[in-house]
Image (cartoon, grey):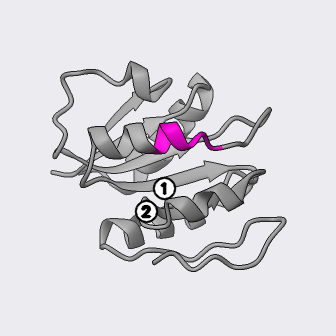
Amino acid sequence: MENILIIDRQPMLRLGMRVIIGAHFQTLSIHEAASISKVSESLDKPAISVILLGLDCESDTLDPEDLISIKKRFPKSRLIIYADQIQHWRALFKFPKSIAAFVSKKAHENELICCLKSVMNGVRQDWKPADGPLLEIQ
């Protein structure tokens, strides 16, 4: 059984993601936390296969320390970022192998499901930030 971890400080967004994902992937175990520091210590490192990291609409910025923390704690997990947009997307070039995909919070649920299926099958997705060129994830 694969495990997914949803990290988002907004409880309603976590609930919505849980409902959407649970409806399409009945065999997944879904865990959630408000932040990486609040992830339960009981979660096994190798058990989490995909992490969905939600960025706040107030500051859609990605702190490189969060990426480092996630990759240290869950080194084999694939990371999907979901946000309205990434304001400081250039910082992501420092971590091209850490991020498997990006999904807009404005996307249709089918886009999220297709993205999850791809990432769970080991396919990395290229994505285009609103203010920049297509980024090829290596």
Give the side of residue 106 with respect to residue 22, left or right: right
Q: Is residue 129 magenta?
A: no
Q: Is residue 78 above or below residue 6?
A: below
Pick the front one: 17 or 102 = 102
Q: Position of residue 58 (x, y in %)?
A: 80, 32
Q: Is residue 64 magenta?
A: yes
**Which of the marked residues, 2 or 1, is nearer the chain's N terminus?**
1
- Graded by Cα atoms within 10 Å as few (under 14), some (14 to 19) or many (20 or more), the crowding at tag 2 reads many
Q: Position of residue 109 (x, y in %)?
A: 60, 58
Quarter of the image for residue 47 reads top left
Residue 107 in view: no
Give amino acid for label 2: Leu
Quarter of the image for residue 92 reads bottom right
Q: Is residue 118 above or below residue 68?
A: below
- For mark 1, what is the residue? 80
Label pair 2/1, CB-CB below 8 angstroms:
yes
Residue at 69% over, 79% down: 134
Q: Is residue 41 above or below residue 113?
A: above
Give amino acid for label 1: Ile
The magenta segment: 62-67
Residue 115 in view: yes
Q: CA distance from mark 2 to mark 1?
A: 8 Å
Which secondary structure is most common in the magenta stretch?
A: helix
Residue at 69% over, 50% down: 105
Task: Describe the element under mark 2 as helix, strand or loop.
Answer: helix
Q: Position of residue 14 (x, y in %)?
A: 53, 33
Outermost residue toward the right in this view: 131
- Residue 116 numbered tag: 2
